[in-house]
Image (cartoon, helix red, strand yellow):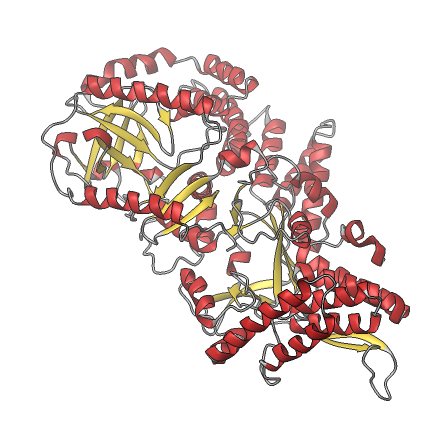
Amino acid sequence: MDIKDVSNEDQYLGIFKQLQGMAERALGRKGQKPRNHTSAHEMVYTFMANMHMNQNTARTDKYRISTTQVPPPYAPCTLSADELEPIMITDMRLETHHRGKRVALRVLTPPDRMTAVMAIVEDENGTAALLQLYHQPDPSLVPTEDIIQQQRVCIVKEPFFKTGVGGSFSIRVDHVNDLIWLRPSDKRIPPKWIVSERLLEESNRNRSHEIRMQGNTAVQRGKWSEAERLYSAAVSVAATPDEERLAHLNRSFANLKLGRFKDSLDDAIEGGRGTPVAEKAMFREARALYELGDFNGSLQTFQKLVTEFPGNTAVIPELRRVQARVQEQETGEYSFQKMHQQARDPNPIIDCATFRAHVEVRMTPDRGRGLFTTRNVKAGDLLICEKAFAYVYAGNDQKLGRQNTLILMHMGSKTVTVGGQAQLITQVVQKLAHNPSTLAEFKDLYHGDYKEVAKTWVEGQPVVDTFLVAQIVNLNSFGAPRSSHESFRQSLEGKPNDNYTTCGIWLIASRINHACVGNCRRSFIGDMQIIRAMRDLEAGTELRFGYCHPEALDTYETTQKRLAHWGFTCDCALCRESQATPASVWQRRRALRRDLSRVLDKHPPAVARAKRLLAELDKTHRDSEGSGIRLEAWDLYLALGSAFLERGNASEAAEALLKALESLGFDVVASPPRICAGQPARFEIRTWGMSIPHTVAIFAKLSEAYQKLAPGFLGSIARYARTAYCTVVGEGDTFAEMFGEMI
C-alpha cells in the first residue's frame, strides 16, 4: 500500500529481465553435477581481491542503490541436523535443494557484505564454495565480521547449491534456521578441524569472570554483538551458580541493545534468581517487558522495584515513562507534539504505545478477517494509533534513509519496488527469530495461497520461513511519509506523493479490508500509524480504507488492475458505478476535463464558461447513483470557487466550493448561499464524504467566502475543517499552525 512500485518503468524492467534471463540460464543447468571445481586457493584469492575492490567502491560511491531479489520460494528445513545425512560439495547438483542432507563447512576468509554476507568456505574434502547468508542482522547492530568468523565451523541444513559468477559455485542460505554455527565442543565438528576449536574452549575453562570483564569492555565500546558473544561464553564456562547468574544478567543488557527483547527478558530472569543482584535483574526485566510492549507487566515490575529498593533513583524516570505508555494504550490520549519532535530524528522511531480499544478483529461475510468498531464513533474520532511491528526509514533526506533504500525484485510475482522493503523483510526475519512470541500473530496476516510449513520449532528454535515473511510483507506493508503533516503541506503546494520508499508492517491496521472510498483514513507520524473515522460509524461497522487511492477518470479496468496485486476484485459503490459507465461517457468526461482545465488556467479564468462546462460534467452522472463521488469534478469546483473569491463574489464562490465538497461525497446544508424556504440560516454537514488534503483547503476557502456571506458560521466551518485536518494528518494539534486564520 502506497509503496514505490516501479515494475512498469523501463529502466527497472530492463534490470528485471536481465536477472530473469540469468535465472533461466542457471535453471537450465538444474540437476547437473559440476565436474571442475575451482581450487580453494584460487577462490580465496579472487574473493579477497573483489572484497577490497568493493570496499574501495563503497568509500567513493556512498549512496549507490543496490539491487537484491526474492528468488522463487522454497521451504525451510524442518528437521534437526542429526536427522540429516552428510553430503560433500562435489556430490551437490546445481540449482538443487538437497533435501535430507547437511554439509559441514569451515570458513576460509574474512566476510564481505553486499546484499548478502559472504565468505569462502570448504568442506571436509577441501572443496571450496562461496557461502551466501541472506537476511542477517543489520551491520549497525552486528558487524559483518561478527556474523562470519574465519576458522569457525558451521552446518548448512538441506543446502541450496547454485551457479555463481565466473564459473564458481555458491551455497545460498535464505532461511536463518538452515545454518548452525558449532561451538568448539560440538561433536559434529569433523576431527580434522577439532584441534584449534577445542584448544580455544579448553583455554576458556574456569575463566568466566575474566571473559565477562572482556564483555564489559565491549559494552563500554558499544560493541553489543561482541559483548553478547563473550557473555554467552562466560555463561557456558561458569564454574559456580553466581558466575552463571552474573553472566546472564550482563547478557540481558547486551540483548536489550541488540533488539532481542525476549532473550533479554529470559536472561534477566535467570540472572535474578537467588540473589544479591535482584535489584539490577528486576530493572532489566522491567526494561525488557517495556520493549516487548508489555507495559502493564513493566509497570508492575518497576513498582515492585520502587517498593523493595526505595533508594534507586534511576527507576523514577522509567516509571514515569511506562505510566505514560499505559495511559496511552488505555485512553488514546497522546502528546502529538512530542511525536512530531521524535519524528524529526534521523530514524523516526516513536516512543509510544498502541491504542486499539474501539476496534476488534472479526470474520467478514466474504473477505476473511476484518476490523470492526466496538462502539459508535464520530467523524474524526481516533480508532487506532498503532506502533509498527517493523519499520524501515528509507527517505532520501537522511544518510540512513539512503542507505536503507534498495531495489527489490520479486522474481515470483514479477514486481519491482524501490525503498526499504528488502530491509523490512530482513528486520522481520530477525525479529521473529529472536522474539518468537510474535510469530503466530505475524503469520496470521494475509499471505494469499502461500503454503506454510507445519512444523514451528526445530532444535529449540522457531522455524522462520523467509519466503512467507516476504509474501506477508509484499501484501501487507504500508508505504509511509516521515509524517503526514509534512506530506499534507507538500500536497497543498502541488507536490503530492502517494508512493513512499519508507515502509513498515502494522499488525492491526493490516486487518482492514479495502474499499476505494473508505470509512476511515490512515496517517503517519514516524513509525506510528494513526487511523481515524472519516464519517460517523455505528458499533459493529467494518472498517475499510483504500489500498490504493482512486483518481479522477479511473475506469473500472484501471482500478481492478491496481488491485490485482492483492488478488481480489473491488465491488464498492464507486467501482459498481464505474463498471456501469459506458465508454462514451468516460470519453465525454475526459473531453470536458480538458476543456475545463484550459478555461480555468486562463488569466483571469473564464468563470461563466467554466460553470456551464461543470454543469455538463455533472450531467454525465445519474443522481440515483450510490456513492455520490465525482472525482473528476471536485478540484475543478475548488478552482472555480477560488476564482470567484478573487473576483469578490462570495455567494458564487461558496456555491462552487459546496459543490466541491459534494463531489467528494459530502451532504451539506448551507443557507446561505442556498435558500431553504421556511428554514433558518445554517451550515451543517449531514454526511461526511472523503477527507483528503484538499478537503481542508476547501473549508479554508469556504471560511473566506463566509466572512462576507455569513460570519456567524465561521466557527462551525473551522470545527469541520479541523475534523477533516485531523482525519488527514492524524492529529489536530498542528491545525492552528497551518490554518490559524480560521480560528
Position in image of residue 583 (x %, y %): 46, 77
Position in image of residue 678 (x %, y %): 87, 88
Q: For the image shown, how many numbered marks are present on the structure?
A: 0
Position in image of residue 112 (x %, y %): 36, 25
Q: Residue at x 24, y 14 (%)?
A: 195
Judging depth in this view, the residue of 259 and 292 nearest the camera is: 259
**620 shown above or below 248:** below
Left or right of 518? Residue 440 is: left
Quadrant of the rendering where the C terminus is positioned: bottom right
Judging depth in this view, the residue of 594 and 300 nearest the camera is: 594
Q: Residue at x 66, y 38 (%)?
A: 344
**58 shown above or below 473:** above
Left or right of 434? Residue 201 is: left
In the image, farthest residue toward the bottom: 678
**446 shown above or below 399:** below
Q: Residue at x 25, y 23 (%)?
A: 106
Left or right of 306? Residue 628 is: left
- Locate residue 596: give its quadrant: bottom right
Judging depth in this view, the residue of 591 and 277 nearest the camera is: 591
**486 shown above or below 370:** above
Position in image of residue 201 (x %, y %): 34, 16
